[in-house]
Image: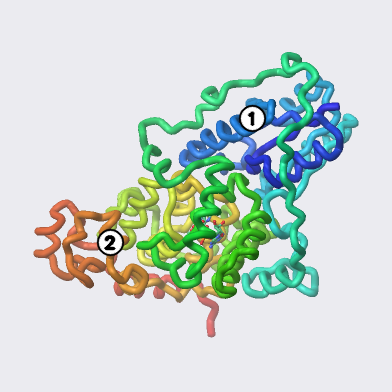
Amino acid sequence: AIALVWLRDDLRLDDNPALRAALEGGYVPLAVHVHAPEEEGGWAPGNASNAWRHRSLRALDDELRTRGSRLRLFRGPTLQTLQSLLAATDAEAVFWNRRYEPAVEARDAGIKRALRAQGVRAESFNGALLFEPWQVGTRQGDPYRVFTPYWRTALAGWREPRLWEAPAVWPALPDEDAVPHGVTLEALHLVPGRDWDAEFWQRFAPGEAGARAALASFLEQGLHGYGTRRDVPGCRGTSRLSPHLHFGEVSVARVAAAVRAADAPAGDVERFLAELGWREFAHHVLHHFPHTADADLNPRFRDFPWAPPQPRILRAWQRGRTGVPIVDAGMRELWRTGWMHNRVRMIVASYLTKHLRMHWRHGARWFWDTLVDADLASNSLGWQWTAGTGADAAPYVRVFNPVVQAARFDPDGAYIARWLPELGSLPLPLRYAPWEDPAALRRAAPEYPRRPLVEPAEGRRAALRAYAAVAAPG
Ligand code: FAD
């Protein structure tokens, strides 16, 4: 009998529980991907994400073909597509790995009900997380809102994962031609117009082989010293596994096991696992507080006096023209490579939400469209954490000073010089705050903004004034 293996954000063969269930259940697996962005509840994947998925789907098809199989692509609506495939192939089962975005969770539950009602074996598995969002809770059975106790409880329940390797050969379809071929990859129109993404692929190789290579190179060169180097954007101190993890090109269980088995200082290993823990926590929060994709976790901010939307200001931030070098360097790294270092994500997000007092939603949307690792759980959490309106104890009153941050985390100014080469000739510390010497700035970089949109000290004062308006008395 045939089982449909419905692949979504688990674009891999290795350690794929849905595929495993099909093979171990004695089924002939039929790998399908259904393109249905309109079913994502207002969070249809953005341009960078689509560009990545295009390549990842092709890579997966290549992997499948080495095993005598292939990937079949279809356009939604998903339920009807699966139903007509079941009818055309006489398949008896549909297996998939779970996703946790609120709209997708609801859709998938509906699909499971409908398929079961027609007598189909429909089952979902955990292929994306170390811990299911509902598996970790307080002693009272409530969800966590703060990372540290969440992760402590999660780790206490840690079990060595049972990793699974896809066999090199598996049963072939009885009649290939009887199965609908679906549409071509090009017909999904995932590739962005213009050559915007060309530079992405100098840094990243989407697909399972690319994910494995990124993990191997991190284990060899990045894990040792990760605890200190992870915060320095000017060096290659992190794994850059985030898009691979988002698209499920490597299983997080495989990553965690490899890191734990590596010959590296315990502190570095623990620190890296805690970052995977943040990803787990983000899914925990989004699952239990589904409104946080669009609204604050902390209701106090409902009446916060955000600045009215100002397209000119927002565009300056998006294009890296705020006049604050560390912010502009980050925004240009994002535009050019589809990725930004975590420390810099915090700095640019803080500048937008605190200094410019724009609602974090504007920043989250831009990230959503331009990040190759755009992920509803991690992005919503990251923005609210930085804006100080979300989970965790970080208070709104913590306002990053971008000049102090730059001096601390880009101590040799290499990161700024890399993404804003026009400022590379400015000495330190002027490179962090070039408006301090207007003549030198004009000589070095006549095109660069003379003054920052908002100066750090002035922005901080305005942010704290706004906060006083919503802070509880006392
Ligand atoms: P590493 O340091 O190598 O960490 C390993 C893995 O742990 C990452 O690949 C990622 O999966 C996970 N991880 C690390 N830090 C975090 C974190 N703070 N939150 C959740 N997971 C984490 N991450 C996304 O994957 N998608 C997003 O859309 C996203 N948006 C963000 C928005 C803001 C405003 C902020 C402050 C952070 C955001 N992050 C997001 C988290 C983090 O910046 C990235 O996961 C990280 O920079 C990825 O680089 P890396 O793979 O080299 O990380």
Q: Percent x, y for residue 266?
A: 59, 74
Q: Label 1 sits on what residue type?
A: Thr
Above or below, 15 relative to 117: below
Above or below, 464 relative to 345: below
Could you tell me which residue is drawn at 86 percent across and 34 percent down?
Answer: 26
Could you tell me which residue is drawn at 77 percent across and 22 percent down?
Answer: 173
The answer to which of 42 and 129 lies nearer the viewer is 129
Splitting the image into 4 quarters, where does residue 74 fall?
A: top right
The answer to whether 465 appears left or right of 185 in the picture is left
Residues tagged 1 and 2 counted as in contact (Cβ below 8 A): no
The answer to whether 410 appears left or right of 282 in the picture is left
Q: Percent x, y for residue 406?
A: 33, 69
Task: Give the mark, 1 or 2, whose residue is nearer the N terminus.
Answer: 1
Q: Give residue 66's mark.
A: 1
Q: Percent x, y for residue 8?
A: 65, 39
The answer to which of 273 and 451 lies nearer the viewer is 273
Q: Percent x, y for residue 239?
A: 50, 57
Q: Is mark 1 within 8 Å of ligand 1?
A: no
Q: Give residue 145's mark.
A: none
Q: Quadrant of the N terminus?
A: top right
Could you tell me which residue is drawn at 39 percent across and 56 percent down?
Answer: 308
Report helix, strand or loop for mark 2: helix
Q: Label 2 sits on what residue type?
A: Pro
Question: Is residue 298 at least partly visible in the picture?
Answer: no
Per the image, the residue denoted by label 2 is 325
Task: Give the class, few, some or many, for how many residues have Cα within 10 Å of label 2's Cα (few <14, many ≥20).
Answer: many
Q: Nearer the viewer, mark 1 or mark 2?
A: 1
Q: CA distance from mark 1 to mark 2?
A: 48 Å
Q: How many labels were placed on the picture?
A: 2
